[in-house]
Amino acid sequence: MTSMSDERLDLELLGFLRLYAEELHEAPSAHDMAIHIAARQGSLGGRMSRLFARPAVRVAIVGLLLATAIGAAMAVGAWRASQVQNGLIALAPGVFMDPATGSYAADSPCAARCAEVMASDMILSGLTPSADGRQFALLDESGTVGTLQTGEAGPAIWRYDAGIDEFALVASCGPDPWDPQRPSHCERPFFSVDGRSLAYIERVQVALDRSDPRSWTWRLVVVDLRTGSSSRHEDLPGYPDQASFVADGRLMLSYRPVDADVFRNVLVDLRTGEVEEPVKHWSRAIASASPDGTWLAYVTYGRPVVRDGIWRPEDNVPEVWVARIDGSDLRRIFRGAPANAIEHPPIWSPDGKELAIMDIGILEIETGTVRPLLPGPLTAWLPAR
Amino acid sequence: MAVRQRSIAQDGARDALPRVALDADLESFVVEHYDRLIRLARLVCRDAVDASDAVQAGLEQAWRRRSSLRDVDRRRAWLDRIVVREAIHITRRRRTMVQRIFGLDQDVEWIEPTGEPTANVELQIALRSAFETLSAEQRAVVALHLYAGHSVAATADIVGAPVETVRSRLRLARERMRHALEEVLE
């Protein structure tokens, strides 16, 4: 069969289109339409639709809706943060202080299963609560949690859900490639501000000669707690004494550069690798980010005391400073008496209003008043149960 | 943000039309263009109610902006442009997300013509099925060029697309309609 010519096709189509266009059984008459249009010209609905038809009004409405959504999200975040109340301070394994009474606590900071773990002599150097206080991350180098959970002991990072009193394995940790005496190559687990990710540091051997400092390196492992997937980030600056996430998702690292006497505190964007140093004028200070990731605090010395050409740490005056994460609003909130160098990072209270600092005490940020802190290695300030 | 207008066709209560002072100029303006525009919109929308909505919205816009049109000779193309764009907009909005994802479309509605020979009925069914599978943009150029008689360049101006795009839409639409016709005529 030969193909139909364009002229014949167009003729057939025109006939069809005329028939099709006539199917107007539900359409109003022209007179009815005119009446309706006239009515809408003066009606509120008509005026509103003309108003909304203006691009500027549409942009304004979209902006208003966005601002409302952002405001609502911030209000919900602030409300949730305000729900977190300060609980016990973990001084050492099984040893807790009640900051309300200033004495040792007889109670455990968590429910039955957790209390059993907390009371054991496991190493609690890596105990960190999430910002909302609903979960803890802990590095269990002795395998205590594994023994209690499955009977299989081994160093691992665990997540404890305070709501359901359950531990969940985040990562098993093998022996340390750099120091065989250390049972785990993982350390310092910490949560993202939104509590959806958990990160930890992993030491990695890159050469056989352990005496060579270049034979090992470290990387950050970030685990998505919803999916269980993890990402590894290498070539990050220094080897951190302190690591935490801040509110905008960047990583804050405190590290001492090789052969340097002072710490550097930098913010690293893990997506771009961009490094920023928000506050540069401190010395000998390890900074800690607040639970909501918007402020940082550190201990430093106003002016290093040097006598006879020798730096005298016992004569230095410790000062505590806070600033917003971007370095703004930097202010000194405490100045102590001459003392030995204090290199412990401040530990923020779960509500973000106080700092617990070894050798100084419990410091209220707003007023600068200090309360006594009981002695101990001081590992974490846990939210109230 | 699209503002859904409450149209006369949706009201379904033509007996209860509002009592308003009907401007004679407005009435003559509507009457002059209504029949042509409602048929044009019907071809794009595939639905008489949607076509009424498109024409109502288009005529309202045109009435408000009538002073901006200096060249009266261009009034027809100007109105066609407003109504066809409104018809395309309404048709797009009618397609739900599910329809967009799975390619489902409205059921082909067929009103049996009376007194038509059987072969012609089959032909109409085939053409109708093919026409309703075209996109709103393709139906718009077919309606403007083949039905309303606008040139390809004028059609391109009305729908706000390059001439080559209009030619391409027409070619694709013709191929689909030709295929439907030839299947019946084989």
Image (cartoon, rainbow, N blue to C red):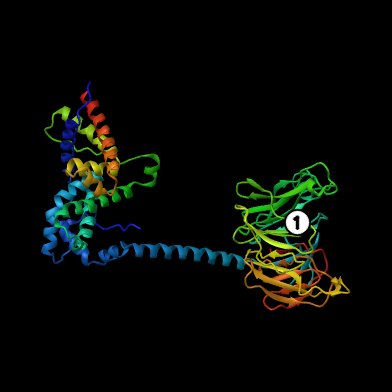
Residue B26 coordinates in the image, percent (x, y): 14, 61
Q: Residue furthest right?
A: A308
Q: Is residue B107 visible?
A: no
Residue A375 coordinates in the image, percent (x, y): 83, 68
Instruction: Residue at 13%, 65% (x, y): give it.
Output: B23
Residue at mark 1? A126
Secondary structure at badge 1 equals loop
Question: Is A71 on the left or on the right of A195, as rendered?
Answer: left
In this view, the residue in front, B157 or A308, is A308
Question: Is A72 on the left or on the right of A254, as rendered?
Answer: left
Q: Where the N terminus of chain A falls, by quadrant?
A: top left
The chain containing the residue under callout 1 comes to: A
Q: Where the C terminus of chain A falls, by quadrant?
A: bottom right
Location of residue A315 by image quarter = bottom right
- The correct choice, above or below, for A219 with respect to B185 in the image is below
In this view, the residue in front, B98 or B18, is B98
In this view, the residue in front, A102 or A202, is A202
The type of residue carrying mark 1 is Gly
The crowd level at tag 1 (other Cα within 10 Å; few <14, some 14-19, many 20+) is many
